Image: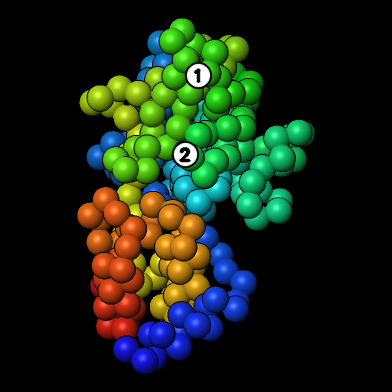
Amino acid sequence: MKALFAIAAVHMLASVSLGQAVVDSAHAMAWSENAGYLNWDAAQGTDAVYFAATYASGWVWNENVGWINLGQGPLNGMSYANTNGLDFGLNIAPNGALTGYAWGENIGWINMSGGAMATPANAARLDMINLRLRGYAWGENIGWINLDDAGKFVGLTPPACPADFNQDGGIDGSDVQAFFAAWESGDFAADVNLDGGIDGADVETFFAAWEAGGC
């Protein structure tokens, strides 16, 4: 236990990276009246959709319009500027609101906060309690994108093995740093025991897996 507190103390002084979450393969669909289902779990590897505390990255697939780019990671490591085609993507505000732009070669820009223009307003957002997306996004060439359906929606899940929290294939101090960064910021990825809250029980679950060397 003393070792755990020592590691935590070191973490407080270190620069850290954010933990990530992935799309739940059982709940990976959004709906567009003009394009059909958008699959947020179609891409694999480095192209897969990932959610960090402040942004998302990766590719979404639709059979009728092709690939949609959510961003490839912000240049400053925290949020996309969304001022040009070199640094665009989906940002996540502290309250879960989704902002920024996605891009499809065949459909142009998608405004992730476009749901605020709907009647009634229903802006796209991350529901951190239920680990799913909600609301609507808007694209001038594709219309409304529904993230709000009760049965077909985009759900999220924390990393499969909490010990390898930063998902780099190894289990070491960088995972501790990444976990505590997510835990302190209230990032849903830190809910490693999947009880819907982010608290000391998640720290215990993480270190149990970490000290065991994996899952």
Which of 77 and 67 lies nearest the eye of the viewer?
77
Give coordinates of residue 24: x percent, y percent.
Answer: 31, 44
Q: Return the x and y of residue 92 as percentages of the image width and height.
A: 53, 41
Residue 19 appears anywhere in the view: no
Amino acid at the residue labelled 1:
Gly
Label 2: which residue?
Answer: 96
How far across and down, in percent of the image, does residue 22 sit? Answer: 39, 49
Between 56 and 119, the one lying in front of the other is 119
| Residue 162 appears anywhere in the view | yes
Other-residue count near label 1 (Cα within 10 Å), few / some / many at <14 / 14–19 / ≥20: many
Q: Is residue 199 above or below residue 134?
A: below
User: Dividing the image into 4 quarters, which one contains the N terminus?
Assistant: bottom left
Query: Which residue corresponds to mark 1?
Result: 115
Helix, strand or loop at disc 1? helix
Q: Whole-percent x and y of residue 48?
A: 46, 47
Badge 2 crowding class, 10 Å Cα cut-off, few under 14, some 14 to 19, many 20 or more, is: some
Q: Residue at x 55, y 25 (%)?
A: 113
Residue 140 is marked as none
Rendered-image quadrant of the C terminus: bottom left
Drawn side of residue 117 relative to residue 108, left or right: left
Residue located farthest toward the top when viewing the structure as drawn = 119
At a point 76% along the width and 33% down the height, the residue shown is: 83
Quick one: SS at disc 2? loop
Mark pair 2, 1: CA separation: 14 Å
N-term mark: 2 or 1? 2
What kind of residue is marked 2? Gly
Q: Is residue 129 above or below residue 37?
A: below
